Amino acid sequence: MHYSDVFRGYLIGGAVVVTDINEARKLYSMGFYGKFVNEDKVKLSEVNNVNSPLQLSIVEALYLVDKGLLEVFDGGGNRLTRDDLVRVGRSTVNNFDQVYTIYRELRDGGFVVKSGLKFGSLFAVYERGPGIDHAPVLLHFIEPRRAVSALDITRAARLSHSVNKRFVLATQSEADGKMHYIAFEWWRA
């Protein structure tokens, strides 16, 4: 990913808001980052009609900062460091470090990653993006020391089957710190 633009966002609570409408449109168009305030699932063909700021999760904001695409400021106009954003993330998002690692690995793998909250999962993962294709994968994070139960698998299977999606469990290896992904799919015999 190589872009010459560096966008400007403001930390508000546990989120980052890009208030300049043109910057918001451009950033969203670059990879479906964030969510326009008071808008739902904006398609690329509709972006230029949106006149709302763009709200980024702290995870998305950190990713964009790491890619050199975003600078984040506090209410007083002070530029926040990466460490500042990590502190905010750790105080507002459970398992922030692991959630960020999953997000980064998926984004770097070419996927569009959105919140999966409405599906009861951590992330909904798209191959191309909302409005272009449906999210074929729902991803849930399991803490490394937590055993995966039959109930976890049953819940995942029922949920993913009811919305016609694959379900992926992600966990971090305590041995090597790497993220591991386990996919579940329905099939008929």
Image: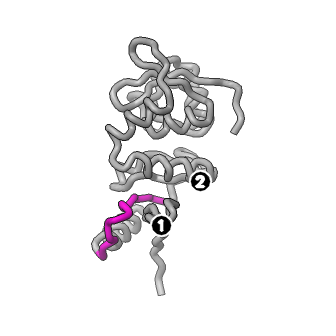
Q: For residue 127, which numbered disc appears in the image? A: 2
The amino acid type found where label 2 is placed reads Glu
Q: Nearer the viewer, residue 176 or 171?
A: 176
Question: Where, quadrant-wise, is the N terminus in this rendering?
Answer: top right
**Label 2 element class:** loop
Q: Nearer the viewer, residue 59 or 79?
A: 79
Q: For residue 129, which numbered disc appears in the image? A: none
Earlier in the chain: of badge 1 and badge 2, it is 2
Q: Which residues are magenta?
A: 137-150
Dot 1 crowding, Cα within 10 Å, few <14, some 14–19, many 20+: few
**Label 1 element class:** loop
Residue at 59% from the left image edge and 39% from the top image edge: 31
Q: Is residue 31 above or below residue 113?
A: above
State yes or no: residue 97 in magenta.
Answer: no
Give residue 134's position: percent from left, percent from top: 51, 54
Give residue 84's position: percent from left, percent from top: 43, 29
The amino acid type found where label 1 is placed reads Ala
Residue at 50% from the left image edge and 50% from the top image edge: 101
Give residue 153's position: percent from left, percent from top: 35, 72
Q: Mark 1 — residue? A: 175
Residue at 49% from the left image edge and 69% from the top image edge: 183
Is residue 170 visible in this depiction of the protein? Answer: no
Is residue 79 visible in this depiction of the protein? Answer: yes
